[in-house]
């Protein structure tokens, strides 16, 4: 009996001691937010809720939780840092910068976390545009090369041309080894194409048609090979000779906005034009009463109703219309040996000129030297800009392709942001991150070898790249429909737009409409699954002069936060955004909200409206475009183009080896990305599920 009582007393003492010890631990446990006592517990609890909301893309909820956490622990740097992250994702960049600067003052610029935070502040505060081209005076310098030889192994010989691909890789036309090779961003050869059974015969230039097929000129074969989008041979255009549709040594090629093919027939000193399937249309550029004739035609570019042809012997660029009528010379000077011509995204020309890469504005004839390729006796025969904004230049004499990158991009490196951490299957962790340059342009083409993920400085176990956003085939779309007095009279146009969008989506894989938002006085989601046309057409009673573009756009974008890697808000309306367009959210805040979450803004203009400055700004800042509903080619290309947009989102899984303290411990993870001479990193923390 005494033994039983002693045991009972011991049990009661142990239980009471455990409760006291647990309570003491609860009071002393500080968590990632620091401090001890009840306030620290409240701060840690609110901080946990904020992190969880952030990883669910619920940024408003995250902001509320972090603000509450700060009320218990004012000036705690980790809370300020996360509050800045949530504001940044919400589009309030200035507010985010204030939080980050306050955190930086506490961390100190000399600490590891301080240096990383300072780099983020400098990047976000210094950038103002998306998808830049070479128009801001920044010089390009050598950052890498794709060599044609590795020790005694010949990889390819005598490159003459390059063609950028949407996945970041590059086709290199190897004149000396009679092939085209596809090289990824790390300089690794992924494919070789040598043509039909008889092979290519001195291939020279490669361009891509509107339907994805490629055209390859063969200098010695005196023909043009038509290739599939993957580089497989399909059929020939032309043959050797002096007649119509024949060639003697074809070199450079161009495709205009209507899909017509232009071939520089070097031996016959003329330009030949064909339809996309190879039907000969006309030749031009020979001597006439109005034109002295070309001496040594080389590069060619077609677009904007003009055809530009370089003549290396005359050191000139001639201008023709699409029918071959001579319009004059481009008033440029100091050309030494112009060869290839290509249009950049902004309508300027990039030209290979001996050892230089130049940019020419065809309207003003202003010439700017972008950079020099290689050293010694260099001959650049082809140059283009890849999808990561670097210039790729084929150096025929050196037998390699040079990579030139903006000087300030090399100095600033890559902008890496860990966007989301999912721990539902802990210890298996899924981590999503984005890689951009300092101007918000996505960096694409990276693979697992370009990344290092660490926990407390130790590489994680089982790092696996599970998805690359740029390879995603498809897109998610949210439609934003203007409900103004103007569109109340254009409901038939709204119906037509919805039908065109629906048809385009049916021709795409993994593509769907996530939501249809009526931008009225109080924006609302429409039921669209039964009938997209009815949802877009709407009812006349909802239209009002007090419609709210900003609230509607915010709602449409929010629906896409957890959508597919490639996503877009497609605005359908008159183009005039109304008097209350930015009553609650400014134009800059809305552009930041879209861009910081990888959402493209596109616009379909109905009626006789105009593309206003606000729409142009949103399109320009996010990589989208505006198109009129009733244009010659329809709006299908705009919708399909969303699936071809660059996307710098990467998703990884790994196995965490950190101690979770039953889900209470703050677990730190860091990701670093490398590309040639550039790198960038980000760190973040997370909680494992509570046990």
Image: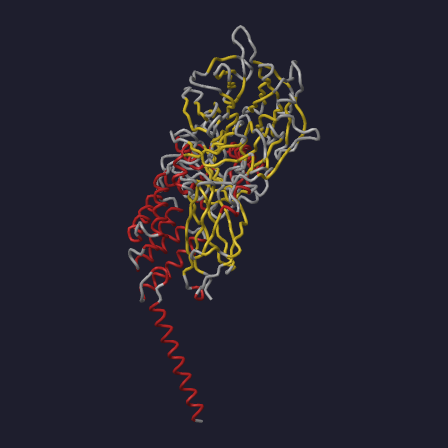
| Residue 85 spot, x, y in % from top left | 38, 49
Count up the numbered dots.
Answer: 0
| Towards the viewer: 207 or 490 | 207
- Residue 679: x and y in percent read 43, 44
Residue 238: image location, x then y, percent: 66, 20
Mark yes or no: residue 566 visible: yes
Work out whether residue 171 or residue 632 is closer to the camera in this orientation and state it.
171
Residue lying farthest to the front in this orientation: 152
Residue situated in front as seen by the camera: 201 or 456: 201
Where 156 falls versus 457 (above or below)? above
- Colouring scheme, one of rainbow, by chain, secondary structure, one colour: secondary structure
- For residue 554, above or below residue 30: above
Residue at 47% x, 55% y: name it: 459
Where 562 sits versus 394, above or below?
Answer: below
The vertical placement of 268 against 81, above or below, is: above
**Residue nearer the viewer, 74 or 361:** 361
Residue at 61 percent across and 33 percent down: it is 229
The location of residue 48, given as percent across then percent down, is: 40, 59
Q: Which residue does the image show at 46% across and 46% down from the upper left?
A: 673
Quadrant showing the N terminus: bottom left
Q: Is residue 582 visible?
A: no
């Amino acid at each position: 009996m005494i033994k039983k009582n002693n045991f009972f007393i011991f049990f009661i003492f142990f239980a009471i001691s455990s409760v006291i010890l647990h309570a003491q631990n609860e009071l002393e446990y500080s968590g990632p937010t620091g401090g001890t006592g009840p306030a620290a517990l409240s701060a840690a609890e609110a901080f946990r809720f904020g992190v969880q909301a952030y990883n669910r893309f619920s940024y408003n909820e995250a902001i509320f939780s972090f603000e509450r956490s700060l009320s218990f622990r004012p000036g705690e740097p980790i809370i300020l840092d996360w509050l800045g992250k949530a504001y940044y994702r919400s589009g309030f960049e200035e507010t985010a910068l204030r939080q980050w600067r306050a955190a930086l003052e506490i961390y100190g610029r000399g600490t590891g976390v301080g240096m990383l935070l300072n780099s983020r502040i400098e990047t976000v505060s210094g950038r103002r545009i998306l998808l830049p081209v070479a128009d801001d005076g920044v010089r390009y310098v050598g950052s890498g090369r794709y060599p044609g030889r590795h020790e005694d192994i010949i990889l390819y010989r005598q490159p003459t041309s390059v063609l950028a691909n949407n996945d970041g890789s590059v086709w290199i036309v190897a004149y000396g080894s009679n092939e085209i090779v596809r090289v990824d961003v790390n300089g690794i050869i992924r494919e070789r194409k040598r043509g039909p059974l008889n092979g290519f015969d001195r291939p020279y230039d490669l361009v891509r048609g509107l339907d994805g097929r490629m055209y390859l000129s063969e200098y010695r074969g005196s023909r043009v090979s038509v290739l599939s989008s993957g580089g497989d041979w399909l059929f020939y255009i032309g043959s050797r000779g002096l007649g119509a549709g024949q060639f003697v040594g074809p070199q450079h090629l161009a495709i205009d906005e209507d899909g017509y093919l232009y071939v520089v027939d070097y031996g016959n000193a003329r330009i030949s034009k064909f339809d996309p399937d190879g039907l000969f249309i006309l030749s031009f550029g020979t001597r006439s009463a109005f034109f002295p004739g070309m001496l040594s035609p080389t590069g060619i570019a077609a677009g904007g109703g003009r055809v530009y042809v370089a003549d290396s012997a005359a050191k000139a660029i001639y201008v023709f219309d699409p029918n071959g009528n001579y319009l004059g010379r481009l008033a440029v000077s100091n050309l030494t040996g112009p060869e290839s011509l290509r249009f950049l995204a902004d309508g300027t020309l990039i030209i290979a000129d001996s050892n230089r890469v130049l940019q020419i504005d065809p309207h003003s004839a202003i010439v700017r030297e972008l950079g020099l390729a290689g050293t010694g006796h260099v001959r650049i025969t082809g140059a283009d800009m890849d999808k990561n904004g670097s210039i790729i230049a084929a150096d025929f004499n050196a037998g390699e392709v040079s990579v030139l990158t903006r000087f300030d991009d090399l100095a600033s490196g890559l902008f890496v942001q860990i966007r989301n951490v999912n721990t539902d299957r802990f210890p298996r962790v899924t981590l999503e991150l984005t890689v951009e340059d300092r101007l918000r342009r996505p960096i694409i083409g990276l693979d697992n070898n370009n990344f290092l993920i660490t926990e407390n400085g130790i590489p994680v176990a089982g790092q696996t790249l599970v998805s690359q956003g740029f390879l995603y085939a498809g897109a998610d779309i949210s439609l934003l429909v203007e409900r103004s007095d103007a569109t109340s009279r254009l409901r038939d146009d709204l119906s037509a737009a919805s039908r065109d969008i629906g048809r385009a989506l049916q021709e795409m894989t993994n593509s769907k409409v996530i939501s249809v938002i009526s931008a009225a006085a109080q924006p609302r989601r429409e039921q669209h699954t039964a009938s997209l046309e009815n949802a877009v057409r709407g009812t006349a009673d909802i239209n009002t002069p007090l419609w709210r573009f900003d609230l509607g756009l915010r709602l449409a974008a929010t629906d896409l936060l957890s959508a597919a890697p490639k996503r877009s808000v497609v605005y359908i309306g008159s183009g005039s955004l109304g008097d209350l367009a930015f009553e609650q959210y400014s134009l800059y805040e809305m552009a930041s909200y879209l861009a910081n979450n990888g959402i493209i803004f596109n616009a379909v203009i109905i009626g006789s409206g105009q593309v206003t400055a606000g729409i142009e700004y949103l399109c320009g800042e996010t990589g989208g475009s505006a198109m009129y509903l009733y244009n010659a080619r329809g709006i299908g290309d705009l919708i399909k183009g969303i699936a071809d947009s660059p996307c710098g989102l990467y998703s990884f899984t790994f196995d965490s080896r950190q101690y979770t303290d039953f889900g209470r411990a703050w677990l730190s993870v860091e990701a670093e990305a490398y590309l040639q001479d550039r790198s960038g990193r980000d760190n973040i923390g997370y909680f494992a599920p509570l046990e």
